[in-house]
Amino acid sequence: MRKNFIAIVLALFSFAALAQAPELATWKQNTTATGYNGIVSNVQIVQYSTNNVYISCTCIPGYSIGPWTGNPNVASNQNFVFKITRNPQQNTGTATAVGLGHIGVWSNGVSVFNVSDAMSYMNQGVWNRNAYYWEGSGFDNCLGHPQQQGEYHHHVSPTCLYDDTDSLNHSPIIGYAFDGFPIYGAYAYTNVNGTGAIKRMQSSYVMNSASTRTNGPAVGGMYPNGCFIEDYTYVAGSGDLDERNGRFCITPDYPAGTYAYFVTIDSNLDPQFPYTFFGTYYGVVQAGNTGMGSGHVTISEPTTIYNETTGVKEVSDDIKFTLSENPVKDFAYIYFDPKSVNNVKAEIFDVRGQLLFSQTNMQPSISYTFDFTGYSTGTYFLYLTTANKRVVQKIIKVN
């Protein structure tokens, strides 16, 4: 009886610890509510192993977005799967530069972008443009916008994601960088040991006062101070945060302490340079999250679904899906059940066996679109395969 009691206590303790794990509990999960253009919003599924968390998301938030003045791009479903380590480690070697594109993911599955708009003065790569200055007029009320491929993102503090007016409480985790360290909102304890009043975290970057720029335009007119990233200089001790816009500190989620990044805003709640984390990552960056075509990580280990309401559920080894429309006129839509196996490969063949379409790494809780507009009327075959399973679905194309 005593052994059974101890086992029950240990199981309850383990479940409580799991439920409180910030890298699992932070995400805003949703599988039914829609956002922009009717796209399912926020995070669709959180899966985890001992060492990693996998976030499947559309990159569309639950809050209202748009319009984007002067920006012709349209936000679209990105069907991302990101990998976040559960055991982040300081990089003691050469630091990894914070590059372009997504550099982390907000807690609602929207992409974090860095301070740059990817352009520089005279395209010389010397005076790099500050995205907030050059593109800020085209941000929506939530301070985000989509890029050319439809990836909605925030370069600065996502004002609609959390209460950035709450200066009385420590801000929540609002995302994770791709090195696995958390990103907090703008307010934290005064002291890194978790003591002192709550205060707004201040960047340690100071805008230069020079009237000239070496190999760059004079200050003023079209190029005022602050329009380029290099117009700011890190001055240690001038603010609360280090050159990465972070610090090692105790937080409510990490009572033993963690390195943490912070978003920075000024006293008017306007974004303050460098806005999010900056320069280089503090930790070791997970592969597959960054660079061209990234954000579609292959899940190559057994995982468990994290469900913040009912606990945990094992991922099935079956291919579970719903297909509509069939017969199809223009587009067919396939949705993989949350308990479907990971990493499904889809192939469409015609009746002669010719391969017409192929897509890999399709994940549960995500909807995908098949474009039949260029196909002739007739019969087609959809093959869904994994390492151990294969399903064949007949699709009829009609006028």
Image (tube, rainbow, N blue to C red):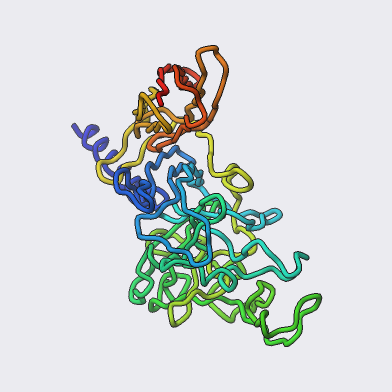
Q: Position of residue 201 (x, y in %)?
A: 48, 75
Query: Up-down: is 340 above or below 295?
Result: above
Q: Position of residue 83 (x, y in %)?
A: 51, 43
**Name of the residue lying farthest toward the top:** 352
**Name of the residue lying farthest toward the left:** 1
Q: Residue at x 75, y 79 (%)?
A: 217
The answer to whether residue 300 shows anywhere in this view is no
In this picture, residue 173 sits left or right of residue 3: right
Query: Up-down: is 334 above or below 192?
Result: above
**Name of the residue lying farthest toward the front:** 399
Q: Quadrant of residue 322?
A: top left
Q: Residue at x 50, y 13 (%)?
A: 351
Closer to the camera in the image, 196 or 150: 150
Quick one: quadrant of the C terminus? top left
In this picture, residue 261 sits left or right of residue 9: right
Q: Quadrant of residue 170?
A: bottom left
Q: Residue at x 60, y 65 (%)?
A: 278
Quick one: quadrant of the N terminus? top left
Q: Position of residue 125 (x, y in %)?
A: 75, 64
Closer to the camera in the image, 257 or 75: 75
The answer to whether residue 6 shows anywhere in this view is yes
Question: How many marks overall?
Answer: 0
Q: Position of residue 196 (x, y in %)?
A: 40, 78
